[in-house]
Image (spheres, rainbow, N blue to C red):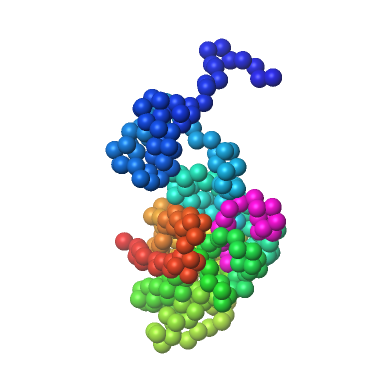
């Protein structure tokens, strides 16, 4: 039994009929005004919604779920860092954007972690088997992603943060990673650097393969040779990036680094400072970033920038449209990064 709190009573829920009686209109008018305003004038819609707010109306989502058969849940599977060295703005930024878009809907987000290096299929199997979500958002996409294949096979609405190489069309939002790496590498070349290293993640991921193509294209356009010794693939944590940067700096003497994200950049920057001693100030850095981290570190950094919050917002928008039945091949967005040079 709940302990009673003095002065606090359980309020009687406000119903559609209460709002209708208050305004002297029909229950149908109230229901349509609160839903989508279909066949209701804008002034009446506004009156009804203002009255609902004043009276404290709360929509009964359990009833909606029973009537529609929907869960009103979106499952998002994102990779989170496995270390606590510097944290991670990646998934948190995406989630902030998703929540922002879903704020005026009935949907909530359930987040499950993806472990890098595994296929992370179980959470998607649970969606298919138990229908615990109406739609799915996935990141860290592989060219032949098993999760995507399963969702396609069973017709579950989904959107990916990244692209596959599957023949079947599906909804996605992605950064043009080839362009971003080309942009960052070209910026380093423009600043006079010639031995430019690339520090990126596992090439099993589509976006890493795309970034490698962009890096090589920028070198080729500038007449610079591609040196495999200047490419390092690391786990997404600063300690691994620091070790790679130390090794590269000691053995191959790069004069610039192109980094896949802020976490890798922080590790690379520390590794260069350790290995290059007094020469580290002459090393250039280019980072694909969704934050403004470079403004607070006191070092020159060129950024290929696209907001992660904006990315998350667009992922949620695409999935909502997919849930409304819009064809997947009309829901494919490729965004380009903005180059931010150090002042």
Which residue is at the far top? 6
Q: Position of residue 2 (x, y in %)?
A: 66, 20
**Residue 247 is at least partly visible in this image:** no
Quarter of the C terminus within the rendering = bottom left
Q: Nearer the viewer, residue 28 or 82?
A: 28
Which residue is at the front of the view, 180 or 196?
A: 180
**Which residue is depicted at the point 57% across and 80% down?**
229
Q: Nearer the viewer, residue 99 or 322?
A: 322
Res. 213 visible in picture: yes
Q: Residue at x 48, y 66 (%)?
A: 327
Please tell me whether residue 20 is drawn above or below residue 326 in the rendered image.
Answer: above
User: What residue sits 38% from the left and 46% below the top?
Assistant: 38
Residue 37: percent from the left, percent from the top? Answer: 37, 44
In the rendered image, residue 13, in percent from the top left (x then y), is placed at 52, 26
> Which stretch is magenta?
124-141
Looking at the image, residue 63 lies above or below residue 271: above
The number of callouts visible is: 0
| Residue 127 part of the magenta segment | yes
* Residue 144 falls within the magenta-colored stretch: no
């Amino acid at each position: 039994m709940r302990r009673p709190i003095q002065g606090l009573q359980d309020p009687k829920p406000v119903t559609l009929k209460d709002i209708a009686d208050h305004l002297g209109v029909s229950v149908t008018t109230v229901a349509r005004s609160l839903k989508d305003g279909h066949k209701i004038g804008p002034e009446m819609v506004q009156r009804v919604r203002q009255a609902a707010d004043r009276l404290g109306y709360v929509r009964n989502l359990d009833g909606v779920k029973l009537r529609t058969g929907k869960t009103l849940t979106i499952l998002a599977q994102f990779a989170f860092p496995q270390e606590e060295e510097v944290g991670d703005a990646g998934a948190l930024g995406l989630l902030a954007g998703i929540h922002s878009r879903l704020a005026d809907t009935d949907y909530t987000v359930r987040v499950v972690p993806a472990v890098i290096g595994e296929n992370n299929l179980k959470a998607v199997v649970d969606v298919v088997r138990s229908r615990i979500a109406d739609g799915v958002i996935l990141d860290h996409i592989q060219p032949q992603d098993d999760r995507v294949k399963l969702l396609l096979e069973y017709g579950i609405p989904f959107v990916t943060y990244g692209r596959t190489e599957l023949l079947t069309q599906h909804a996605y939002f992605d950064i043009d990673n080839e362009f971003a790496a080309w942009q960052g590498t070209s910026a380093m070349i423009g600043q006079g650097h010639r031995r430019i290293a690339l520090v990126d993640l596992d090439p099993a991921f589509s976006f890493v393969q795309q970034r490698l193509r962009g890096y090589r294209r920028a070198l080729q356009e500038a007449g610079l040779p591609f040196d495999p010794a200047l490419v390092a693939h690391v786990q997404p944590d600063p300690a691994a990036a620091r070790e790679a940067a130390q090794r590269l700096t000691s053995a191959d003497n790069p004069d610039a680094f192109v980094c896949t994200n802020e976490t890798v950049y922080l590790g690379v920057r520390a590794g260069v400072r350790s290995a290059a001693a007094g020469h580290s100030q002459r090393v250039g850095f280019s980072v694909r970033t969704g934050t403004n981290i470079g403004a607070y570190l006191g070092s020159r950094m060129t950024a290929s920038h696209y907001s992660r919050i904006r990315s998350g917002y667009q992922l949620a928008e695409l999935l909502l449209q997919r849930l409304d039945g819009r064809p997947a091949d009309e829901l494919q967005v490729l965004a380009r990064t903005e180059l931010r040079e150090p002042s």
